[in-house]
Amino acid sequence: MIRKLAPLLALFLVLAAAAPLAADIRFELGFGWTLVRPNMNATYLNRFQPAFAPPDRFIAGLAEQTVRFRGRTTYGLNGYFNVLFGENFGLQVLADWHRPKLGGSNGPYTYTIQFQAFEPETYADEIDWEASTGNLTTTAFSLNALARFRVADDLSLSVSAGPSVFHFEGKAGHIGYTFFELVPNGDEFVLSGGTYRMVVDFGPQTKYGANLGVEAAYEAFHNVILAVDLRYYAAPKTPLQLHIVEDEIITRPIDEIEAAIGLGTLDVNPSYLRAGLALRFVF
């Protein structure tokens, strides 16, 4: 943990040490709205043997589907606090929050089951699977070094970069699960069963990364600044364990279903690009 926080601590100490040497210290407090394009683009292969009862009548079976989860462009919020040591350099604290929707088109859900009735039989089907739905909630905190250059009396450009902490979690659907039951009925067997469309969740998780951005700021009024920026946040992909969300429609034990389908992990990418519009106050 200490090693992961070392860059952030080093940046803070360097800038803190420089603060007493600065002749002119100014503070800026701001908030804004962002347009966020997440990098989330993951695929999950759900492949398992359908549940069958009684087990001594089961011969073989396979259910399979590929589910895609892709982040959609969305709006978010951000806030920041700048400490400027003189005209050109300073320290910047950023906070970002957004919750993009997850989507993605999917192929059909297919399954085949072989079982022993009076003689071996095979049953197969293919189900059209709807597009994915869900969301990925992300909060990012950043501590940046800031360099600002004035290009006109009321206009400035700045560059800032530094370490970031990402906290994220999500929920998405749907993952399929199929079960069968073979019931004797007089001189024949009746095959019954069903398929659940299940929502899964993943996280919460915290990861460390970095951010880099550029900004143009216009002093619209005295001590009131209107700013636009473009910033990229980078963090490593993280495999997160999936868990089925309880639903009253699902009558079988959740643990049993997760074990039966071998519910695995989803590679979640919390990185994103954002464009922001902000209002800042100088004091």
Image: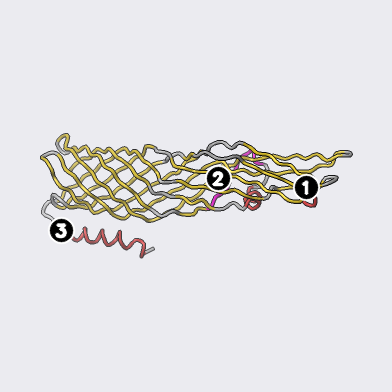
Colour mapping used in the image: secondary structure
Q: Position of residue 46 (x, y in %)?
A: 59, 48
Q: Is residue 125 left or right of residue 118?
A: left
Q: Is residue 54 left or right of residue 6?
A: right
Q: Which residues are magenta?
A: 241-250
Q: Are marks 1 and 2 in contact (CB under 8 Å)?
A: no
Eye-nearest disc, 1 or 2: 1
Element carrying mark 3: helix
Label 3, on which residue?
20
Neighbor class of circle 3 (other Cα within 10 Å; few <14, some 14-19, many 20+) is few
Neighbor class of circle 1 (other Cα within 10 Å; few <14, some 14-19, many 20+) is many
Quadrant of the image for the N terminus?
bottom left
Element carrying mark 1: strand
Within the image, what quadrant is residue 228 found in? top left
265 magenta-colored: no
Label 2, on which residue?
200
Within the image, what quadrant is residue 274 found in? top left
Quadrant of the image for the C terminus?
top left
Distance Cα–Cα, label 3 vs label 2? 52 Å
- Residue under the point 39% across and 49% down: 271
- Residue under the point 55% across and 41% down: 173
- State whether residue 270 is above or below residue 101: below
Distance Cα–Cα, label 1 vs label 3? 80 Å
Query: Of callouts 3 and 2, which one flags the residue occurring earlier in the amino acid sequence?
Result: 3
Q: Amino acid at mark 3?
A: Pro
Q: Are marks 3 and 2 in contact (CB under 8 Å)?
A: no
- State whether residue 42 is above or below residue 248: below
